[in-house]
Amino acid sequence: MDLATLIQTIANSVVAGSVYAMIAVGLAMAFGVMKMANFAHGEFYMAGAYVVYVLYALAGWPFPAAVIMAIPVVAAMGVATERLIFWPTRENVLAGFMATAGLALILQVLVGQTWGVGLMRSVPTPYMGAMDVAGAKIGWQRVLVIPVGAAMLTALWYFLYRVKAGKALRACAQDAETARLQGINLNRMSMLAMAISGASAGLAGAMMAPIQPVTPYMGHAVILTAFIVVVMGGMESIAGAVLAAIILGFVHTFVTTLFDAVTAQMVGVACMALVLIWRPQGLLGRVKA
Amino acid sequence: MLKLDGIWVHYGTVAAVKGISLEVDENRIVTLIGANGAGKTTTLRAIGGLHHPSQGEIRFRGERIDRLTPERINALGIATVPEGRRLFPQMTVMENLEMGAYLRNDPAGVQRDLEEVFHHFPQVKERCDQLAGTLSGGEQQMVAMGRALMSGPSLMLLDEPSLGLSPIMSQEIAKIVKELHANGRTIVLVEQNARMALLLADHAYVMETGRIAMQGPAAQMRDDPRVRETYLGI
Ligand SMILES: Nc1ncnc2c1ncn2[C@@H]1O[C@H](COP(=O)(O)OP(=O)(O)OP(=O)(O)O)[C@@H](O)[C@H]1O
Ligand SMILES: [Mg+2]
């Protein structure tokens, strides 16, 4: 690996890590507050990409406006999922899981029926050109993912640790019953968690729309990685998810560059297994009392 | 102030509380004692709104509360210190206290109650920035009581505050219960430590397998031969 390739791979790793983190924090948050695994989370990511495809590539909106629009659209999908699936099945993790797996399929078919399955939807690159670092060319479109991801994670951190409603969300994740005894409305907090969960996955998909092929099945490819990240990070830990996302971003990108994508997936799973042998609760997870 | 009338609580099909009635007058300490599994915690959870009774009524200041959510009940001025303390372990002590005041919109009142918490529990003040999960059992109990105080309650439900604490620490907790009462709060105290509970309380109820087996003024209960034998081990 020469220097240019090395720099290129490192840059790609950071981009991948940022995207994984944006996707996984929402999954971790939904799991934390509702103790529910959302199998349709990958389709939230896909939906974000389609919002950009429809508004930017088809309707001709400016790219930033299309990206910003993806946030409320997919947040609303998150809230609807909470109301229609998680709230009715809240006593039954398996039912919730099955129902969201069903939702994932429904969304895939719906999108396929509407915009077609066979062809990849191509979204023109809004920001052409590349950054040149020691011979390595890093496209601006990719570079842009990093500050957007960092800004989103910072905003989320600020909300969870500095704003009362965010703290209440953490309280619900740590002990829902006791949170209710403090006057925290668990019902509303669940909706809030799913709104944030949808918004962050939607934003990630929107940012990736010009970089990745937009297809009805693009969520399928990320959901496995997102689950690996969340398990490796410690299920409910947001910080753990971010850390695991960055590690996995490097592992996947380097192994893909040196070998291939299938090997990268396997090495990713192996990393998770190793972490769990060393720390069964995940990198930053806590041991349940 | 608080009145339970023929309350039944079921877990699935099993009744844990079988038609109990009890009354708590304003500014009293009422204790609920009884063996493991008697249904004391379940009774407090029903008052706090975590379980809806399958039969019977709970009234607070005359108003039916047995169909309200825990959020609404907290807003009415009832605060629970749950069994096993149940702090938010990954949040700081200060954040735990803030959560206690979650529903309040009177910053001045919240500040005053925070001062009161620090006055009762000077150790808690020193630990403000520490994660609650890293505190000792006694310190956790203090934070749990402080958190309940932060909602500005008129009625406090304490579930085994001395559980797992050293005798000295239990003494300390007992002293604070007295102070809270002296400051005008009504208290329902559930205790395994019947000796301590009967010394603190005005009135006592003894629960056995989901029912009230005996009740009376605490002083009288202390001298009751059955209570002495079963719960005081004399
Ligand atoms: N979540 C639950 N599901 C099923 N049964 C329960 C549950 N919680 C309590 N019970 C049962 O209800 C009965 C009363 O329990 P409860 O916790 O109210 O007793 P307690 O008087 O508080 O006991 P302790 O002194 O041990 O705390 C017990 O038989 C217990 O096994
Ligand atoms: Mg109990």
Image: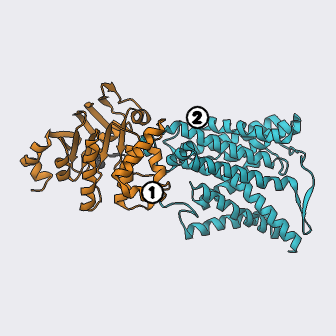
Residue in the image at 54% along x and 60% along y: A285
In the displayed structure image, the side of residue B12 where residue B102 appears, left or right: right
Q: Position of residue A33 (x, y in %)?
A: 54, 46
Q: Please name the residue that numbered disc 1 is placed on.
A: B132
Q: Is residue B170 visible?
A: yes
Chain that is coloured cyan in the picture: A
Q: State whether label 2 is within 8 Å of ligand 1.
A: no
Q: Which mark is residue A83?
A: 2
Image hue for chain B: orange
The relative height of residue A107 versus residue B68 in the rendered view (above or below) is below
Residue in the image at 71% along x and 37% along y: A72
The part of the image, by quadrant, that contains residue A140 is bottom right
In the displayed structure image, the side of residue B53 where residue A16 appears, left or right: right
Q: Is residue B12 visible?
A: no
The relative height of residue B91 versus residue A54 in the rendered view (above or below) is below
**Are labels 1 and 2 on one chain?**
no
Q: Position of residue A35 (x, y in %)?
A: 53, 48
In the displayed structure image, the side of residue B117 where residue A78 appears, left or right: right
Q: Looking at the figure, which quarter contains the C terminus of chain B?
A: bottom left
At label 2, the amino acid type is Arg
Q: How many marks?
A: 2
Residue in the image at 63% along x and 35% along y: A80
The relative height of residue A229 versus residue A219 in the rendered view (above or below) is below
